[in-house]
Amino acid sequence: MIKKITGFHITLFLILLMGCAPTKVIWTSSPEIQIFQNKYYRAQLEALKGDQKDEHNFFVLFRLTLNNQTDKMLEIDWNKTRYIYNDYVRGGFVFKGIKAKDIKNLTIPHDLIHPGDTFSKEIAPVKLITWARLRDRSVGKDESGFSPGIIPEGNNGIYLVVRYNGQEVRKKITLTIDSEDVR
């Protein structure tokens, strides 16, 4: 016996089909770029997304940009600079060229910024990364061998430690990461 297909059956089928459709997640940063300025430097912190082909397109890195506004050298102390998540310190940062032993021994070289110059670096929270296995031959001996992980929803940022003329200048700079499911 063949049942008659009605508008109700078609609507029910479409509702069930939509329920099986994958959702896409849209990740946002508010603000897109957080800016801070004092008498020593102008700083910008921006969350950067991973592979643009990835359907989720989540944030994995920060870009820190500093403009030295003094007549003396500035130094970023990476051994004291920390990742902040929801107002709690969650470890330091890694970036291209860094070695695991430097992180472990707190011997990460400082970055120097000459008077009037602008410095920029992409950094990832060490707490969120994955390291390549020691036997992984695809990683060159001079490469860091890490992959950045997903920066979670919430208040994320940097507790930045900059040295100016022998003194430490500390500043917390944060932005908010959110995600939203869309169909």
Image: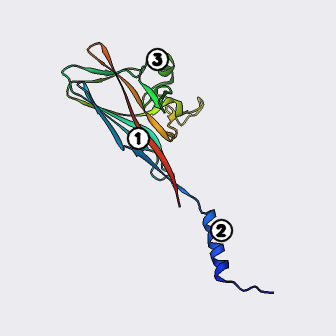
Mark whose residue sits in front, 3 or 1: 1
145, above or below 21, in the image: above
Q: Which mark is residue 16?
A: 2
- In terms of sequence position, does the residue under pointer 3 or pointer 1 come before the other? 1
Say if residue 97 shows up in the picture. yes
- On the image, the x and y values in percent for residue 22 come to 58, 59
- On the image, the x and y values in percent for residue 109 come to 38, 20
Amino acid type indicated by mark 1: Ala
For label 1, the residue is: 47
- Given residues 98 and 82, the one toward you in this image is 82
Q: Residue furthest right?
A: 1
99, above or below 152, in the image: above
Between the residue at mark 1 and the residue at mark 2, the CA separation in whole angstroms equals 37 Å
Amino acid type indicated by mark 3: Leu
- In terms of sequence position, does the residue under pointer 2 or pointer 3 come before the other? 2
For label 3, the residue is: 106
- Residue at image point 40% right, 38% down: 175
Q: Residue furthest top?
A: 166
Amino acid type indicated by mark 2: Leu
